[in-house]
């Protein structure tokens, strides 16, 4: 277990990152925290929200604050896998001899924005998701390692579904979190407009670098997980699986397939990072509860009855999480 000085240093670094992001991004505290949690948990994040809510700006600002290489891929129906991972090109030297060389694609960055990922064909989506899972790109007989840290932030527009290719559930499961980006409040909207009319915009300053991120990530792995907290996370997962004895009544009625074991792993990993952000070396039930919706909303598949009754993953999970938490707290 790490010492208090290491813990304080990690918390101060993360607070400094959030302050710098706050110079550009107004509000959206839960979104900023979720993206940082995914970065420190070595996972990837899917953001869903209408255009204009600052999703692209957030990742660009994060890259500047953390001094990381950033790239943006605009997904379109004609995008090919080689446009993402790279391709082999023929080069000629001074003597006219030709040789093949691998030209790296935009996936070779620390922070990759996959904008409107559901607009690309499944073949292109799978090329990105393979790189996300394996952290490598294979071209011919050569395998190329991706630099660490490596985070893919994919975005989806929930309004426009015409001409899109929704991600299959098995591929959605590869994202550590799915975060819903909502509209700003009235006060936040006023602050956004105030910043727009200012003569000069604040520029975020770099406060961490690649090695510092990896150091904080290693500190996150030292956060302790008590057996009763681990049991709570497992109880949440099993409550979403309709065939289990521990399944919640809403799961039996409305859920076709519950969360996979990746959901349990994600609850614990994301909760540990949140605990560290709160200055603790131990995971609490509250940490797991707070990240549960973002971790599980894309890991459950609803049945026809749920759609017919107007149920959504949000409405079902809110009841399951609150009732399981109350049940565990009363025990």
Image (cartoon, rainbow, N blue to C red):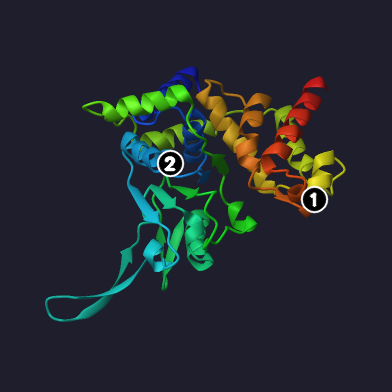
Q: Is residue 325 left or right of residue 293?
A: right
What is the x, y in percent for residue 200?
A: 22, 28
Q: Quadrant of the N terminus?
A: top right
Q: Quadrant of residue 138?
A: bottom left
**Image: 304 above or below 236:** below
Q: Residue at x 35, y 57 (%)?
A: 106
Q: Is residue 102 left or right of residue 245?
A: left
Q: Looking at the image, tell me whether mark 2 or mark 1 is earlier in sequence order.
A: 2
Q: Residue at x 61, y 33 (%)?
A: 291
Find numbered disc 2 in the image and state the secondary structure of the residue it sits on.
helix
Q: Is residue 67 left or right of residue 166?
A: left
What is the x, y in percent for residue 141?
A: 42, 72
**Image: 196 above or below 12:** below
**Image: 210 above or below 142:** above
In the displayed image of the protein, which residue is found farthest to the left? 94
Visible in this render: residue 16?
A: no
Q: Which residue is mark 1?
A: 305
**How far separated are the C-alphas under marks 2 and 1?**
33 Å
Visible in this render: residue 294?
A: yes
Mark 1, Cα crowd under 10 Å, few <14 / some 14-19 / many 20+, is few
Of 74 and 218, which appears nearest the observer?
74
What is the x, y in percent for residue 284?
A: 65, 25
What is the x, y in percent for residue 229?
A: 71, 29
Q: Is residue 296 left or right of residue 159?
A: right
Q: Which residue is mark 2?
A: 55
Mark 2, Cα crowd under 10 Å, few <14 / some 14-19 / many 20+, is many
**Image: 90 above or below 175:** below
Of 43 and 300, which appears nearest the observer?
300
Find numbered disc 1 in the image and state the secondary structure of the residue it sits on.
helix
In front: mark 2 or mark 1? 1
Q: Which mark is residue 236?
A: none
């Amino acid at each position: 277990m790490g010492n208090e000085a290491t813990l304080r240093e990690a918390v101060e670094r993360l607070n400094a990152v959030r302050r710098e992001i706050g110079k550009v991004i107004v509000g959206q505290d839960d979104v900023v925290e979720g993206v940082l949690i995914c970065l420190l948990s070595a996972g990837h994040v899917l953001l869903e929200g209408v255009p204009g809510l600052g999703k692209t700006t957030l990742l660009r600002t994060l890259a500047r604050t953390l001094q990381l290489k950033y790239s943006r891929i605009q997904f379109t129906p004609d995008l090919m896998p080689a446009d993402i991972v790279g391709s082999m090109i023929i080069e000629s030297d001074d003597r006219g001899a030709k040789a093949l060389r691998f030209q790296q694609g935009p996936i070779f960055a620390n922070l990759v924005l996959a904008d409107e990922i559901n607009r690309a064909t499944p073949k292109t989506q799978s090329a990105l998701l393979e790189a996300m899972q394996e952290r490598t790109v294979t071209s011919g007989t050569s395998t190329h390692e991706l630099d660490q840290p490596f985070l893919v932030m994919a975005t989806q527009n929930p309004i426009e579904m015409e001409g899109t290719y929704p991600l299959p559930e098995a591929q959605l499961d590869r994202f550590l979190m799915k975060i819903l980006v909502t509209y700003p409040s009235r006060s936040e909207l006023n602050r956004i407009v105030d910043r727009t009319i200012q003569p000069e915009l604040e520029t975020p300053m770099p406060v961490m670098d690649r090695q510092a991120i990896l150091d904080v990530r290693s500190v996150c792995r030292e956060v302790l997980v008590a057996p009763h907290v681990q049991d709570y996370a497992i109880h949440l997962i099993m409550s979403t699986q309709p065939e289990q004895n521990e399944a919640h009544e809403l799961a039996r009625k409305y859920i076709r397939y519950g969360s996979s074991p990746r959901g349990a792993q994600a609850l614990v990993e994301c909760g540990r990072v949140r605990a560290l952000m709160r200055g603790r070396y131990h995971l609490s039930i509250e940490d797991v509860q707070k990240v549960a919706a973002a971790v599980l909303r894309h890991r459950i598949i609803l049945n026809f009855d749920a759609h017919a009754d107007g149920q959504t993953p949000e409405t079902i999970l809110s009841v399951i999480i609150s009732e399981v938490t109350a049940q565990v707290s009363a025990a």
